[in-house]
Amino acid sequence: MRDNPPTSVPATTCKSTHHITAMDSVKDAVGMGDNGPKTQATRAEMSAAKLPLAYRDQCAHLLIPLNKCRYDNYYLPWRCSDERHGYEKCQYEEFKQRVKKMDEIRAEKEGARSN
């Protein structure tokens, strides 16, 4: 038997330190975290990240860290899954908002299509 057992840090002290994980940053970005939703990346951030103009939308603030993660991990498909999921969820939510807005416009025109 050992005379001196190894000491360990109690679990309660580990929880009191605030370490931001990838999951926490994704939750914050999509509005499920404690800090509320981050609405948009600034033009300077998008320009510095060299985002193509087609991708500079409401979800650019999630695409920037996703692209950085992809670059850092040599675009391995099994890496950066949390970041990718957050970005794809944001894209889907934005799509649903566009569809809802279009349905409202059609309802105002009594179903008449614009084309």
Image (spheres, rainbow, N blue to C red):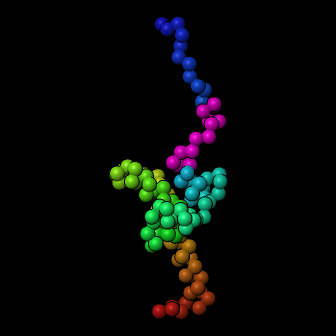
Instruction: Tell whether position 26 is magenta.
Output: no
- Residue depicted at x 59% and y 91%: 109
Observer-nearest of 4 and 65: 65
Whether residue 81 is visible: no
- Residue depicted at x 54% and y 76%: 98
- Residue depicted at x 56% and y 49%: 24
Q: Quadrant of residue 67?
A: bottom left
Whether residue 41 is visible: yes
Horizontal relation, residue 15 to residue 86: left or right:
right
Q: Is residue 56 above or below residue 49?
A: below
Name the spot of residue 61 as percent of width and height, x first. 53, 61
Q: Is residue 79 above or below residue 56?
A: above
Q: Which residues are magenta?
A: 12-24
Observer-nearest of 61 and 80: 61
Name the spot of residue 3 as percent of width and height, x first. 52, 7
Instruction: Tell whether position 18 is magenta.
Output: yes
Q: Is residue 42 above or below residue 2?
A: below
Observer-nearest of 82 and 43: 43
| Dominant secondary structure, magenta | helix
Name the spot of residue 64 as percent of width and height, x first. 48, 59
